[in-house]
Amino acid sequence: MAIGQILGYLGGALAVVSGLVSIALQRPLISILTGLELGFIPASLLPVLGAIGVIGGLVALYFSYRREPLYVIVGGVLGLAPPCALSLLAIIGGLLMMREK
């Protein structure tokens, strides 16, 4: 298993977790972990962004398994919605997978 694939799995899993937290608690995961409030995102929009993040995380996870780097990058970009900066790992993993091919 290559490092790009591992980063794709990790970024996708973190995007799924962040999306589920945004849906359930209507607060971004970064606000819960650090205490920083992101006032520019309304709480009513967070469940929608969380759903987009969950879909993006699942896309990154599945296509990391299939070793399709372009779709891993797309999943990582969608995973940024909840907001989850850690889904950048999936984008980096997809880029590394492209470089390996």
Image (spheres, grey):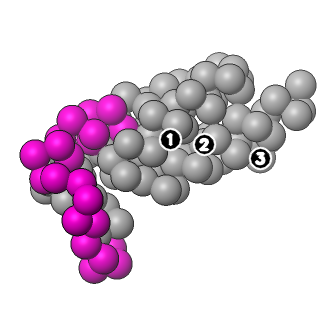
Extreme-left residue of the structure: 44
Q: In this rendering, is residue 26 above or below 101?
A: below
Extreme-bottom residue of the structure: 35
Q: Secondary structure at mark 1?
A: helix
Q: Please report the bounds of the magenta region as a residue range.
A: 32-53
Hey, what amino acid is under mark 2?
Ala
Q: In this rendering, is residue 54 above or below 20?
A: above
- Residue drawn at the location 80% of the way across and 40% of the way down: 96
Q: What residue sits right under mark 1 in the picture?
A: 12
User: Is residue 32 visible to us here?
Assistant: no
Other-residue count near label 2 (Cα within 10 Å), few / some / many at <14 / 14–19 / ≥20: many
Q: In this rendering, is residue 41 above or below 33?
A: above
Is 9 part of what is drawn in magenta? no
Question: Of the residues under marks 1 and 2, which one precedes in the sequence?
Answer: 1
Distance, label 1 to label 2, CA atoms, is: 6 Å
- Residue 90, labelled with which disc? 2
The quadrant of the picture occupied by the N terminus is: top right
Image location (x, y in percent) of residue 93: 70, 42
Please report contact status of discs 1 and 3: CB closer than 8 Å, yes or no.
Answer: no
Question: Of the residues under marks 1 and 3, which one precedes in the sequence?
Answer: 3
Q: What residue sits right under mark 3 in the picture?
A: 3
Question: Of the residues under marks 2 and 3, which one precedes in the sequence?
Answer: 3
Q: Is residue 44 left or right of residue 15?
A: left
Image location (x, y in percent) of residue 18: 34, 51
- Residue drawn at the location 49% of the way across and 56% of the way down: 85
Distance, label 2 to label 3, CA atoms, is: 11 Å
Quarter where residue 101 is shown: top right
Image location (x, y in percent) of residue 50: 27, 41
Q: Which numbered mark, 2 or 3, is in the foreground of this view? A: 2
Hey, what amino acid is under mark 1?
Gly
Please report contact status of discs 2 and 3: CB closer than 8 Å, yes or no.
Answer: no
Please report contact status of discs 1 and 2: CB closer than 8 Å, yes or no.
Answer: yes
